[in-house]
Image (tube, grey):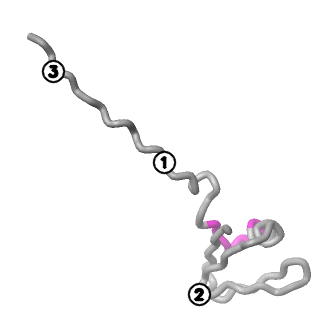
């Protein structure tokens, strides 16, 4: 599932001869054909980039050692 937004709330487009429509400026693509069609449209922006879907790994906590003086 990939989410897309459009600057037009009810943008319509065709995928394999069938019409699809954005609802309130949002559309969730479930198939590769839908993703390919949406990636070609200029007025559409992909919201969840596959590179950003991976959660960032938390950094390990650093422990400070007291210096012996």
**Mark 1 / mark 3, whichever is N-terminal:** 1
**Residue situated furthest top in the rendering:** 69
Residue 33: quadrant of the picture: bottom right
Q: Residue at x 51, y 52 (%)?
A: 55
In the rendered image, which quarter contains the N terminus?
bottom right
Mark on residue 66? Answer: 3
The secondary structure type at the circle numbered 3 is loop
Question: Which segment did they paint magenta?
Answer: 39-46
In this rendered view, identify the residue nearer to me: 7 or 24. Answer: 24
Residue 64 in the image: state x and y as whole percent. Answer: 22, 27
23, above or below 31, in the image: below
- For this view, does 5 lie left or right of residue 40? left
Residue 62 in the image: state x and y as whole percent. Answer: 30, 32
Q: Residue at x 72, y 86 (%)?
A: 21
Q: Nearer the viewer, mark 1 or mark 3?
A: 3
Q: Residue at x 47, y 44 (%)?
A: 57
**Residue situated furthest right in the rendering:** 17
Gap in angstroms between the C-alphas marked 3 and 2: 57 Å
In this rendered view, identify the residue nearer to me: 51 or 11. Answer: 51
Residue hosting label 2:
24
Residue hosting label 1:
56
Residue 12: quadrant of the picture: bottom right
């Amino acid at each position: 599932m990939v989410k897309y937004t459009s600057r037009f709330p009810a943008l319509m487009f065709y995928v394999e001869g069938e019409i699809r429509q954005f609802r309130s400026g949002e559309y969730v693509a479930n198939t590769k054909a839908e993703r390919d069609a949406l990636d070609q449209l200029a007025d559409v922006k992909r919201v969840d980039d596959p590179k950003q879907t991976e959660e960032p790994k938390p950094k390990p906590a650093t422990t400070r050692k007291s210096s012996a003086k």
